[in-house]
Image (spheres, rainbow, N blue to C red):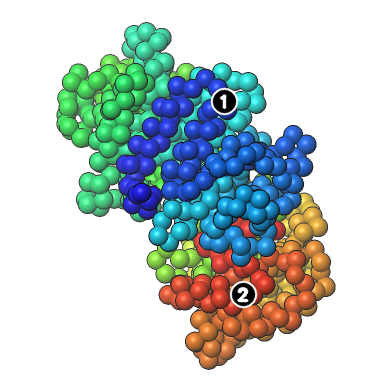
């Protein structure tokens, strides 16, 4: 059997469409769940897939659907699925028997041998966990699941969650199908940071224009449902091009432009009127009235009315929203552009109708505004931080140390800009561990990039020695401007301020949130931090050699549930590690022996990317009772 590593994006989409078509012929939610489990299994080439639900009293989880076994019920606080559900965490395990959370009871009873496993929690609209999708035993030579499988299973989990929510509300199954199709349409978008509201807006704008043009209600509604799929072909465009932060070069542009034809190919074989309409929309939404568009260079009324309408809806929305590659345009600029492009890019009649119906269009835009879920995910009631940069040196695709605590507070400034982009404007306090470049570099760039947009002073919270170094050697008007004497563009206060922190003192940084520093051992003055929310805390060590002070903190503060410790070099480079006061896996795990608590979770960061494989392997071999997780950029930690 073919494993999913070998499946191309096209085949994946085909698979999804096949299942979707199957789903849409069903009339019963239980059958839908069963088809979705099959879809999860095929998409990831797993041997089995189960859909688990949280019981009404929230005390247990049970299998709604499950390949190869009867319904099973487990206490919610047991097992790997339980852990995923409770922590809202995605889990990938190569060998479940190496994980102490694994509940072996089912295997013992059924005689089935579970090895690799992947679990994705499902949430309802209020962000409560309602269950989880679980796949077991990857059918490939390697036998383990990877990040791509995770992405694919996420698709199935989105549908499953949507279906469950609808079933609960006793919604019409047809209604659910519409929701699922909207979600489908956003696949192409979902890898960029947008929420999927783009496709919903395009749908509504298209219907308004269709009705204004004289289309009957039934057909206008069909176009409304089909237009969200205009960019479905983008799933086949590599991430590096789709999410490139800058202008595409000629080669990349050629690849990008294939999304129209690809989308057509993906949808054209269906007999359903909806997909037939979607095929037209996908194919023709980049054609232009004057014949200068793609893929075919069709002209005027040669372009199907669905294509001409979606073109206006799509471009209007694209121009008005931020994209990875550009900022949103002002309305004035957009309207001028539309007037300019009347009878060039766009059908002149439709442009006139667009302006006639502008009020209605703008009101839709307001109702379906984008919410930037990426950061709002970090909900106030959750104990979660985001890793903005996880590595010990900068390299393509690897960011250096930075931790996002809440919208105003971060620890270290190695990689604020790449991860946060505009959200970095809101950062008010950077809590520095020490003065090495990989921990401070983005102080320079967030001030520079967003100088005209910031209205709050940026506070550098650091040890006196660290501040001295920054003043003398970094923001000194030679390497970079001394922002502490430059007033902000929008306010009279200075752009930057230094605040000396005291070790062991608790600073309040939000409701029920505090941070305190403890001294660590590195080649320059340095500290680690304990970030506490309610009665739970996470300790971040930062660069260090001796772990004594960290161990002291963890022994004495039982609210610490989680620690992050560095591991810069492989054990073979012990000398360099010691000299630069860093750790290797060998040093790390031998030093951790002194820590006499075992209910703490261990995360590892600050790896030098070129040693990533070697260090991961060593960590796996040497970790003993620890089940450490090696952090990557953009990971979340729940503590
Ligand atoms: P999209 O971002 O959804 O944009 C859809 C269409 O809106 C574009 O089709 C274009 O007609 C219009 N549009 C969007 N932004 C601008 C802009 O800043 N100026 C002008 N004049 N028109 C704009 P187009 O050009 O065929 O692009 C199709 C898709 O290709 C875009 O979808 C986007 O995903 C991608 N793309 C285009 N240019 C770039 C780029 O420079 N960098 C990256 N990363 N992607 C790009
Ligand atoms: C796929 O998972 O194959 C589609 C996404 C991509 O091409 O990166
Ligand atoms: C677990 O979640 O730990 C056990 C459940 C299973 O084996 O499917
Ligand atoms: C650092 O402390 O991360 C910089 C020094 C080194 O990598 O050896
Ligand atoms: Fe497009
Ligand atoms: Fe460092």
Q: Position of residue 370 (x, y in %)?
A: 52, 36
Cα–Cα span, label 1 and label 2 = 45 Å
- The answer to which of marks 1 and 2 sits earlier in the sequence is 1
Q: Is mark 2 within 8 Å of ligand 3?
A: no
From the viewer's perspective, is 153 left or right of 564? Answer: left
Answer yes or no: is residue 188 visible. Answer: yes
Q: Camera-side residue: 467 or 91?
A: 91
Image height check: is 456 above or below 173?
Answer: below
Q: Position of residue 362 (x, y in %)?
A: 47, 24
| Residue that mark 2 sits on | 623
The dot on residue 599 is none
| Label 1 crowd (10 A; few <14 / some 14-19 / many >=20) | some
From the viewer's perspective, is 570 left or right of 552? Answer: left
Image height check: is 489 above or below 477?
Answer: above
Q: Residue at x 68, y 76 (%)?
A: 527
| Residue that mark 1 sits on | 29
From the viewer's perspective, is 415 left or right of 216? Answer: right
Q: Camera-side residue: 55 or 465?
A: 55
Q: Camera-side residue: 60 or 105?
A: 105
Q: Residue at x 56, y 81 (%)?
A: 584
Image height check: is 388 above or below 469?
Answer: above
| Label 2 crowd (10 A; few <14 / some 14-19 / many >=20) | some
Quadrant (top left, top right, bottom left, bottom right) of the C terminus: bottom right
Q: Camera-side residue: 61 or 368?
A: 61
Q: Position of residue 201 (x, y in %)?
A: 45, 28
Q: Describe the element under mark 1 as helix, strand or loop.
A: helix
Answer yes or no: is residue 178 visible. Answer: no
Q: Residue at x 59, y 78 (%)?
A: 622
Q: Describe the element under mark 2 as helix, strand or loop.
A: loop
């Amino acid at each position: 059997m073919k494993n999913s590593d070998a499946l191309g994006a096209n085949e994946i989409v085909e698979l999804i469409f096949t299942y979707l078509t199957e789903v849409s012929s069903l009339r019963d939610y239980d059958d839908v769940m069963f088809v979705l489990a099959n879809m999860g299994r095929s998409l990831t080439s797993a041997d089995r897939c189960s859909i688990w639900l949280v019981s009404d009293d929230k005390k247990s989880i049970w299998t709604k659907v499950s390949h190869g076994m009867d319904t099973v019920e487990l206490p919610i606080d047991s097992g790997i699925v339980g852990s995923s559900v409770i922590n809202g965490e995605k889990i990938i395990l190569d060998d479940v028997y190496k994980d102490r959370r694994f509940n072996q009871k089912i295997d013992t009873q059924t005689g089935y041998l579970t090895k690799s496993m992947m679990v994705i929690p499902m949430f309802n609209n209020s962000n409560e966990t309602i269950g989880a999708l679980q796949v077991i035993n990857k059918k490939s030579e390697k036998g383990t699941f990877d990040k791509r499988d995770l992405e694919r299973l996420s698709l199935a989990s989105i549908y499953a969650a949507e279906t469950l929510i609808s079933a609960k509300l006793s919604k019409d199954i047809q209604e659910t199908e519409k929701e699922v199709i909207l979600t489908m349409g956003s696949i192409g978008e979902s890898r960029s940071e947008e929420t999927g509201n783009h496709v919903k807006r395009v749908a509504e704008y298209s219907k308004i224009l269709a009705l204004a043009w004289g289309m009957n209600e039934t057909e206008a509604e069909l176009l409304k449902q089909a237009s969200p799929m205009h960019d479905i072909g983008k799933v086949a465009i590599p991430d590096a091009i789709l999410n490139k932060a800058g202008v595409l070069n000629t080669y990349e542009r050629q690849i990008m432009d294939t999304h129209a034809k690809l989308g057509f190919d993906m949808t054209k074989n269906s007999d359903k009127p909806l997909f037939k309409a979607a095929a037209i929309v996908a194919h023709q939404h980049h054609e232009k009235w004057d014949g200068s568009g793609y893929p075919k260079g069709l002209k005027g009324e040669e372009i199907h009315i669905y294509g001409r309408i979606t073109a206006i809806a799509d471009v209007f929305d694209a121009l008005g929203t931020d994209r990875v590659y550009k900022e949103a345009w002002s309305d004035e600029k957009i309207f001028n552009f539309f007037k300019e492009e009347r009878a060039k890019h766009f059908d002149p009649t439709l442009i006139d109708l667009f302006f006639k119906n502008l009020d209605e269009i703008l009101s839709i835009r307001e109702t379906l505004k984008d919410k930037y879920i990426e950061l709002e995910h970090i909900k106030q009631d959750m104990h979660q931080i985001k890793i903005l940069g996880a590595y010990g040196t900068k390299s393509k695709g690897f960011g250096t140390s930075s931790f996002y605590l809440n919208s105003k507070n971060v620890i270290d400034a190695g990689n604020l800009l790449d991860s946060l982009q505009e959200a970095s404007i809101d950062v008010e306090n950077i809590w520095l561990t020490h003065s090495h470049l990989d921990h401070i570099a983005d102080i320079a760039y967030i001030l520079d990039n967003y100088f005209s947009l910031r209205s709050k002073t940026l506070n550098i919270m650091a040890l006196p020695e660290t501040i001295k170094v920054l003043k003398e050697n970094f923001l000194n008007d030679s390497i970079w401007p001394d922002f502490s004497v430059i007033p902000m563009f929008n306010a009279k206060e200075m752009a930057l301020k230094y605040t000396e922190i005291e070790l062991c003192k608790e600073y309040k940084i939000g409701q029920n949130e505090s941070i305190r520093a403890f001294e660590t051992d590195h080649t320059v003055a340095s500290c680690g931090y304990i970030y506490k929310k309610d009665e739970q805390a996470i300790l971040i060590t930062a660069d260090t050699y001796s772990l004594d002070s960290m161990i002291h903190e963890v022994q004495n503060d039982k609210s610490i549930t989680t620690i992050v410790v560095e591991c810069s070099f492989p054990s073979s480079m012990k000398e360099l590690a010691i000299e630069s006061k860093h750790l290797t896996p060998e040093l790390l795990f031998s030093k951790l022996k002194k820590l006499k608590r075992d209910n703490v979770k261990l995360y590892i960061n600050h790896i030098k990317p070129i040693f990533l494989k070697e260090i991961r392997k060593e960590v796996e071999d040497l970790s003993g009772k620890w089940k450490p997780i090696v952090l990557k950029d953009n990971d979340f930690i729940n503590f």
